[in-house]
Image (cartoon, grey):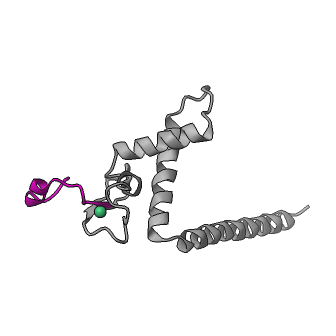
C-alpha cells in the first residue's frame, strides 16, 4: 500500500466534513435570519442562559423536567437584565429590541459576553444625567 490512497481518502473525508459543517452553519444562519429581531433576541437570551445554567448543573444530579428548566432560565434572565435584555425587559418594553425607544449600548466584556444592546426604558432618570449605567 502506498500513502497515496490513504491521503486521498483523508482528503475526501476532510472535504466531506467541511461541506457538512458549511451546510450546518448555513442552515443555522437561514433559521436565525428568518426570525424577527425580537424572536432572535429572545432565542439568544434563552439559549445562552440555558447553556450557562447547564454548565452549573451538578454532573450526577437529575435533570429537571422541561418546564422547570424554562422557569429557571427565565428567572435567571430576569436577574441579569443587562446580559439578557430581551427576556428581562419583556414586561416593561414589549417592543424590545426593534421598537424600544431607549436602546442602550452594552460594551463587550470578554469572556463573559460579547456586548450588544439593552432596554433603557426602566432606567432611573437620574442615572442618565450621569451617563447611564455601567
Ligand atoms: Zn425599552
Q: Does residue 131 show up magenta in the picture?
A: yes
Residue reaching furthest to the top: 60
Q: Quadrant of ligand 1?
A: bottom left
Please provide percent x and percent y for residue 74: 45, 45
Please provide percent x and percent y for residue 53: 49, 40
Quarter-of-image position of residue 61: top right
Residues shaded magenta: 118-134
Q: State the residue at coordinates (48%, 39%).
A: 72
Quarter-of-image position of residue 95: bottom left
Q: State the residue at coordinates (55%, 37%).
A: 68
Q: State the residue at coordinates (78%, 63%).
A: 10
Does residue 128 appear left or right of residue 70 in this picture? left
How many numbered circles are shown? 0
Quarter-of-image position of residue 69: top right
Q: Does residue 133 show up magenta in the picture?
A: yes
Is 107 or 133 nearer to us in this picture?
A: 133
Q: State the residue at coordinates (53%, 33%).
A: 57
Please provide percent x and percent y for residue 94: 37, 62
Please provide percent x and percent y for residue 112: 37, 49
Which quadrant: the N terminus?
A: bottom right
Amino acid at each position: 500500500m502506498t500513502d497515496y490512497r490513504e491521503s486521498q481518502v483523508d482528503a475526501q473525508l476532510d472535504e466531506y466534513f467541511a461541506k457538512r459543517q458549511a451546510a450546518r452553519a448555513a442552515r443555522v444562519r437561514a433559521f436565525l435570519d428568518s426570525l424577527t429581531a425580537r424572536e432572535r433576541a429572545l432565542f439568544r437570551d434563552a439559549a445562552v442562559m440555558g447553556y450557562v445554567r447547564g454548565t452549573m448543573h451538578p454532573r450526577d444530579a437529575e435533570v429537571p423536567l422541561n418546564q422547570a428548566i424554562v422557569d429557571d432560565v427565565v428567572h435567571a434572565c430576569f436577574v441579569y437584565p443587562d446580559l439578557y435584555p430581551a427576556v428581562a425587559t419583556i414586561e416593561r418594553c414589549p417592543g424590545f429590541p426593534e421598537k424600544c425607544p431607549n436602546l442602550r449600548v452594552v460594551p463587550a466584556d470578554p469572556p463573559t459576553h460579547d456586548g450588544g444592546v439593552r432596554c433603557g426604558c426602566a432606567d432611573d432618570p437620574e442615572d442618565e444625567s450621569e451617563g447611564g449605567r455601567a
